[in-house]
Image: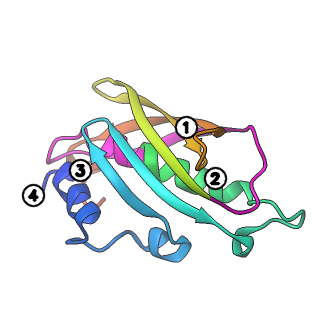
Amino acid sequence: MVKVLDLLQGMQRGAVPPAPIARALGFTLMAVQPGQATIAFEATERFANPMGTLHGGIFCDIADAAMSCAYASTLAEEESFTTLELKINFLRPVWKAKLRAVGKVVNAGRTIGLAVCDILDEQDRLIAYATSTFMTLRGDQAKGR
């Protein structure tokens, strides 16, 4: 069984294909190390809500990807995880921008973990802030995930 960090680093290098959602939305895993991951995404009118700004669901997707990769990078070979909760604060509107979602693990307990994510624009302005709670799965719960 492959350690999740090795798989994620393979994705970062392009040796492992990205997740289907990453291909669909066009975001990229730019960096990953134990407990931290960065997702890059270019916001365009393609992802606009009816008011013309970036749809909130896209913010959630890239924040979730960054925090999930950060948390997954801390897991052992036989472990998997699931998201229990995701919360996001939208701080600035975005029309078109190159965004960076930086996920960091705040606490990785035996079963429950917490991660945070800053979504930043090209000027390093904080655009959105997210938190997520994860549950580590082991044994039969982790099989096939």
Q: Earlier in the sequence, mark 2 or mark 4?
A: 4
Q: Residue furthest right?
A: 51
Q: Quadrant of the N terminus?
A: bottom left
Q: Secondary structure at mark 3?
A: helix
Please tell me the numbered disc located at residue 1: 4
Name the residue carrying label 3: 140
Type of amino acid under label 1: Asp
Q: Secondary structure at mark 4?
A: loop
Q: Nearer the viewer, mark 3 or mark 4?
A: 4
Left or right, residue 4 beside residue 65 = left
In the image, is residue 134 above or below residue 40?
A: above
Type of amino acid under label 3: Asp
Name the residue carrying label 1: 118
Alpha carbon distance from label 2 to label 4:
32 Å
Left or right, residue 66 beside residue 35 = right
In the image, is residue 57 above or below residue 72?
A: below
Q: Looking at the image, which residue is at 64% across and 38% down?
A: 125
Could you classify mark 3 by the number of other residues whose Cα lies within 10 Å: few (under 14), some (14-19), or many (20 or more)? few
Q: Earlier in the sequence, mark 3 or mark 1?
A: 1
Q: Earlier in the sequence, mark 2 or mark 3?
A: 2
Please tell me the numbered disc located at residue 59: 2
Q: Which residues are magenta?
A: 68-97
Could you classify mark 1 by the number of other residues whose Cα lies within 10 Å: few (under 14), some (14-19), or many (20 or more)? many
Type of amino acid under label 4: Met
